[in-house]
Image: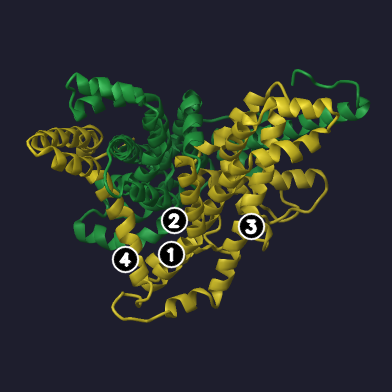
Amino acid sequence: MARIPAYVPFLVVVGAIGIPILVYAALGIGERVLAHLPARLERRTRPWLWLGLPLVLVVVILVYPIVTTLGTSIMGARSETFVGLDNYRWAFSGTMLGIVGNNILWLVVYPIVTLILALAAAVLFDKVRYGPLAMSIVLLPTAISFTAGAVIWSEIYSFQPEGSPQIGLLNAILHLFGFAPVPWLIQPIVNNLALIFVAVWLHLGVATLILSAAIKNVGGDMVEAARLDGAGEFHIFASIILPNILPAVLVVLTTTLITSLKVFDIVYVMTNGNFGTDVIANRLYYELFAASNFGHASAIAVILLFAALPVALINVVQFRREAK
Amino acid sequence: MSARAPKRRGSTGRWARIGVHVVVVAIIVVWFVPTIGLFVSSLRPQAEAASSGWWMAFVRPIYTAQNYELALDQLQTASSLATSLAIAVPTTALVMFFSVLGSYALVRMRFAGRTALSLILVALLVTPPQITLVPLLRLYYMAGLSGTLPGIWLYQTGFTVPFGVFLLRGFIASIPEELYESAHLDGASELRIFRSIVLPLARPILASLGILAFLWSWNDLLIPLLFLGGSPLAPAITVNLSGLAAQTAQGRGPLMAATFLSVVVPLILVISMQRHFVRGILGGAVKG
């Protein structure tokens, strides 16, 4: 059964309980020291005493690496020579074009499919008595890792040549209706869409939940009034509900955009980028470990960062608006 | 719902109702069946699984626990689950602790740069983890953090704290000012206010943050794949699964069993604490 080094349980206790207790004690000591300072200085120093460690964590894990990667992206494979924009030129040429293209496909298809399905689910779940059950079921896959989701769907997409028994669910269904089996993970474009659907399956619940909450906030009176005026359900949705839930729609679009940018697990597990399904994050893993080219890896990481920048800006603007 | 306009649209209305049921049931089926398929596959003997799909188990019910024995014995599944727990439990605790510290200071204390700091944290919410890998692989190697559990806690905590601060912030800001004032008048110290007012009141939202932090940590593949290599520990369960998935030689049964074991833990968590989970998702709906 499990063979775990004996120090591990001890280490876990230290990490989960020991560190918080130590930090808390350190805060206590810090507060004692602050109490002896002049009031002005005390007020000025206190925030940094409390924020210090969380900020150090964020600086070490996020801020410092972002700045450094910007630097290594204009250096050679071992970060020893300056190469200017060579890595970026490489990132937009040759095989990389197909890879960037795949990410663009993800960026377009994944948010749109998720949004449409989530809108349908959010609206329709509200109209049936078993809606809460449906919502719980759609939420289940959100607990499942992308890795496990990829394993689950690899089985569903499983393909055998025509004539042999199909043990994958999708091809078995096709067979039942007399169609030829489809090599879901091999046939170009189809395979990318098949991978994208795995992500849709895993995270539809989150999008549905966000939209459903927003729809419940739309004034029931307005909807009732429109209904009494004889407006059709679709008209009510398009002219009353949709305009009122645009912020939630934006959240769904931005979160799915970010997921499309950094998607790795699904591609790594299901095709490892073969058959024209490679994406930037998987290629980055290859550059790090197989090719050991830190320049290339940094450059494509920076591309991902810049692609995420508009979303970061939207969030900042939204946050400032809400703070007022 | 109450003032449904019946009859007016006659049969169109009825067809629309049927259409609604068809779509909702279709969604339920597609979102439920894959997990059932995984469970049933994990219980089928190899000879069966090689020749027919899992649904045939309902026609010819032949079940076995052998896949689970194989997964636990030979695929290191139990050790991998232990490694994943040893990653996720401290990470969850540390994310909760540092997030509540940070958001309390950010909300309650006035200082120069406070707004700028909040905005930077919000901007960092959507950072793709890939941007951190090159420098951190080097830093971890130099600092001896590669292949260690604390290295993984450090990464996942640092990466998740901006979200935690963001999620808790609104909640802590909504604690009424009078509570703090009366505590101050009673001579309570900052630390005492934090412990006996903020922490108890923030318990529900901390539970939400805890669930999300645990799920992200438990389900993470990239970071344990990159930073836990070369450690004496078994690989994290996600890393183990991704390796097994690449080997097609073995029967798929043990892989199905290992995968099912890996999803049972988060599924139970989400089902049993769905209310907290939902609040976390709705409260922090900005992260990708």
* Badge 2 density bin: few <14, some 14–19, many ≥20, Cα 10 Å: many
Q: Position of residue B151 (x, y in %)?
A: 27, 49
Q: Position of residue A248 (x, y in %)?
A: 59, 41
> Do residues under tags 2 and 1 come within 8 Å of each other at their CB atoms?
yes
Q: Secondary structure at mark 1?
A: helix
Residue under pointer 2: B128
Residue under pointer 1: A301
Q: Chain of mark 2?
A: B
Q: Quarter of the image containing the N terminus of chain A? A: top left
Mark nearer the N terminus (3 vs 1): 3
Q: Chain of mark 3?
A: A
Task: In this rendered view, identify the residue nearer to me: A158 or A261.
Answer: A261
Residue under pointer 3: A108
Work out how far the residue at label 2 is from the one at label 4, CA to CA, in angstroms.
15 Å
Q: Disc 2 residue type?
A: Pro
Vertical side of A132 occupied by A110: above or below = below
Q: Secondary structure at mark 3?
A: helix
> Do residues under tags 3 and 1 come within 8 Å of each other at their CB atoms?
no
Q: Is residue B140 left or right of residue B11?
A: left
Work out how far the residue at label 3 is from the one at label 1, CA to CA, in angstroms.
20 Å
Q: Disc 4 residue type?
A: Thr
Same-subunit check for callouts 3 and 2: no
